[in-house]
Amino acid sequence: MDIKKTILPDDKLKPLYQDPLKLVFGRTFTDYMFTMEHTAEKGWHNAEIKPYQSLMLDPAANVLHYSQEVFEGQKAYKSPKDEILLFRPQENARRINHSLKRMCMPEIPEEIFLQAEGELVKLEERWIPRAVGASLYIRPAVISTEAALGVKPADRYLFFIILSPVGPYFQEGFNPVGLWVSDSYTRAAQGGTGEAKTGGNYAGTLLASKIAKDKGCSQVLWLDAVEHKYIEEVGAMNIFFIIDNKLVTPKLSGSILQGITRKSVLQIAEDLGIVPEEKQISIDELIEGIKNKKVTEAFGAGTAAVISPVGRISYKDKVYIISQETGPWAKRFFDTLTGIQYGEKEDKYGWVYKVQ
Ligand SMILES: *Cc1c(COP(=O)(O)O)cnc(C)c1O
């Protein structure tokens, strides 16, 4: 595929950030973006890398009313040898197509997805922080752009990719956070869109997230939508527990997002010396396990934070403390994954993708 490029003169480029470790997530954007259009007649066409700019959308554009949208979240890293590294981007290419199919949108050939983000990241190399902990966040998204208020799949789409340099997720250090378990709000139901990375899934969780914050917790731990009994995930992260010295995570249920970090944690577990187990875990079982000290650790796993230690669970107005400090397994998984991502540890699984 030929990507048309509109390049700015050097004096029109944005000034680079001062301290990459102080970058707040998703506030700074680079000089360029990738766009590509889709129509029924032409398929995907008009691939372009051009200066970062606002989109022109008709106010009747389908996405603004009915949320026919999907996205991805990835990171580019600088290795000690100054290479540009992506982490398992083929998995994101596969997942965006899984989401697109679910949302009745046209799929993107995997090689085109990889070429588009590869060329954009390469052009924006100067924005990739060299500091460990910082990285260049990649946000691909597809939206329906047809101006029509009827509820139906649109006949026009836009695929775009924007880039945002980000600092470490934990500005105050790698400390355990609290999760609030909602026994009334739910994120996703069987048969719904929970397994797709689609915008509407997130809008619906904002109210419960606000309640979680009011209760002093950083995020919501979601339960299943039918019985409010089984643990699902955290909404931007999948959840793991160390129970009886086993690594336990909820089995994919159809309403849990299939995280690439989740998959990677499960894949490296045995090599790190712990047995992984995917199973249904009820909230009662978890609380019982915390009480009798069988649950020794909990942590979230997702691209943004990589591993996020969880120290306490609030459920039905009681707080259950797992640990005041970050546990050894959270540290081990964090160090191993980030070591591979930054090209500092041996990539024995073949997960690192070099952008040439
Ligand atoms: C993106 C996301 C995750 C984490 O997925 P990764 O591929 O590990 O970044 C988990 N849950 C939800 C709902 C998500 O959107």
Image (cartoon, grey):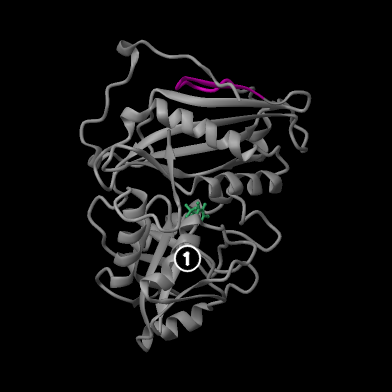
Near mark 1 (Cα within 10 A), the count class, few <14, some 14-19 or many ≥20, is: few
Q: Is residue 55 magenta?
A: yes
- Between 22 and 107, the one lying in front of the other is 107
Is residue 60 in view from this perspective?
no
Left or right of residue 255, residue 215 in this image: left
- Between 333 and 162, the one lying in front of the other is 333
Query: Residue at position x 54%, y 67% from top?
Result: 232
- Between 84 and 105, the one lying in front of the other is 84
Q: Measured along the vertical axis of the image, is residue 49 above or below residue 290? A: above
Helix, strand, or loop for circle 1? helix
Query: Residue at position x 75%, y 29% from top?
Result: 155
Query: Residue at position x 27%, y 26% from top?
Result: 16
Left or right of residue 241, residue 330 in this image: left
Left or right of residue 236, residue 59 in this image: right
Q: Measured along the vertical axis of the image, is residue 240 above or below residue 140? A: below
Magenta residues, as a range?
45-56
Left or right of residue 4, residue 149 in this image: right
Q: Which percent across, then down, holds residue 291? A: 37, 86
Furthest toward the bottom, the residue is 292
Q: Is residue 192 magenta?
A: no
Quarter that holds the N terminus:
top right
In the picture, residue 55 is in which quadrant?
Answer: top right
In the picture, residue 109 is in which quadrant?
Answer: top right
Q: Which percent across, then down, holds residue 189? A: 65, 62
Q: How many marks?
A: 1
Residue bearing mark 1: 267
Q: Measured along the vertical axis of the image, is residue 283 above or below residue 138? A: below
- Please name the amino acid that badge 1 sits on: Gln
Q: Measured along the vertical axis of the image, is residue 50 above or below residue 116? A: above
Quarter that holds the C terminus:
top left
Query: Residue at position x 70%, y 46% from top?
Result: 101
Q: Which percent across, then down, holds residue 180? A: 42, 66
